[in-house]
Amino acid sequence: MIDVPALQGIVGEDWVITRREQAQSYLVDETALPIRPEPAENVVVVKPANREEIAEILKLANREKTPVYARGGGTGNIGGAIPTM
């Protein structure tokens, strides 16, 4: 899993979600239940405020070989907003 304290150092502690129950709404989209992909087990949600924070998050994820899933409103219906790795 990615270095959570490092993420918190980038965006602030309040903008990093690590508890599964708090992240649950980020693990689904509008894909029909029978074909909805299963989300990954270890997921961290990060809410950056600007492009500089996004750049730092991506640098950290690249160094740690951690997959990143960009997410908009989660209104798609093809499973693209669901982190699966």
Image: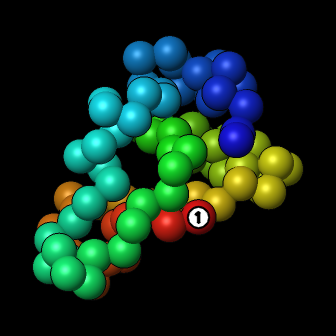
What residue appears at the point 29 percent right and 43 percent down from the top-left corner?
A: 24
- Which one is nearer the viewer's eye here, 7 or 54? 7
Residue count near mark 1 (Cα–Cα under 10 Å), binned few <14, some 14–19, many ≥20: few
Q: How is the image coloured?
A: rainbow
Q: Secondary structure at mark 1?
A: loop
Residue located farthest toward the right when viewing the structure as drawn? 63
Compared with 73, 21 (above or below) is: above
Q: Quadrant of residue 62?
A: bottom right
What residue appears at the point 45 percent right and 40 percent down from the top-left corner?
A: 45
Q: Is residue 67 left or right of residue 77?
A: right
Task: Locate residue 58, reporting x and y percent.
Answer: 67, 51
Residue on which the image places disc 1: 85
Compared with 11, 2 (above or below) is: below
Image label count? 1
What residue appears at the point 20 percent right and 81 percent down from the top-left corner?
A: 34
Point out the image quarter for the N terminus.
top right
Q: Is residue 64 at least partly visible in the picture?
A: yes
Q: Is residue 18 left or right of residue 4?
A: left
Task: Locate residue 67, reporting x and y percent.
Answer: 65, 60
Compared with 41, 17 (above or below) is: above
Task: Locate residue 85, reporting x and y percent.
Answer: 59, 64
- Which one is nearer the viewer's eye here, 52 or 18? 18
What residue appears at the point 26 percent right and 84 percent down from the top-left corner?
A: 35
Residue located farthest toward the front when viewing the structure as drawn? 34
Q: Is residue 48 left or right of residue 7?
A: left
Q: Is residue 75 left or right of residue 14?
A: left
Amino acid carrying label 1: it is Met
Task: Locate residue 52, reporting x and y percent.
Answer: 59, 41
